[in-house]
Amino acid sequence: MNKNKQSQWKKLIAQWERSGQTRSEFCEKRGLSLHQFTYWRTELGKAQQPDGRFVQISGNGSAEPLEIRLSNGTTIKIPSRFDQAALKNVLQVLQ
């Protein structure tokens, strides 16, 4: 993997994550190929993925939402106040 391209795409993906835009909106605004964006997001995500096991986290009392990133690149944002039963159902479906 070309380190220069890898670095450029890491920066773009980080910008997108902070932007609040959909992938399509982000790419269209910057003249990027959605297909390439998705490819690099997946490839770079593979390099950063843990072994697939769950890790325990502890809250810091923040009102910030919790984000769960799946190995396929999907991000699940959970608000600080959430329905525990609904989250349990979602997690069961994902298993």
Image (spheres, helix red, strand yellow):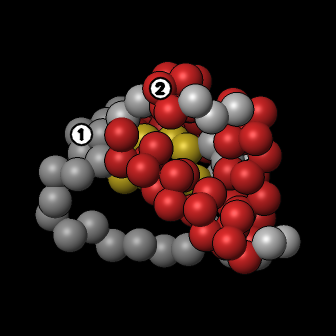
Q: Residues at badges 2 and 1 in contact (C-beta under 8 Å)?
A: no
Q: Position of residue 9 (x, y in %)?
A: 62, 57
Image: 54 above or below 18: below
Name which residue type carries label 2. Answer: Lys
- Circle number at residue 28: none
With 44 as the anchor, is 19 left or right in this view?
A: left
Q: Secondary structure at mark 1?
A: loop
Q: Position of residue 24 (x, y in %)?
A: 58, 24
Q: What residue does disc 2 label?
A: 29
Q: Nearer the viewer, residue 47 or 3?
A: 3
Residue at x 48%, y 74% (from the top left corner): 56
Between discs 2 and 1, the one toward the N terminus = 2
Q: Nearer the viewer, residue 27 or 49?
A: 27
- Circle number at residue 81: 1
- When asked about the image quadrant of residue 32, the answer is top right
With 43 as the anchor, is 59 left or right in this view?
A: left
Residue at x 47%, y 56% (from the top left corner): 14
Q: Secondary structure at mark 2?
A: helix
Image: 66 above or below 78: below
With 6 as the anchor, is 24 left or right in this view?
A: left
What number of labels is visible? 2
Q: Check disc 1: other Cα within 10 Å, few if <14, some if 14-19, many if 20+.
A: few
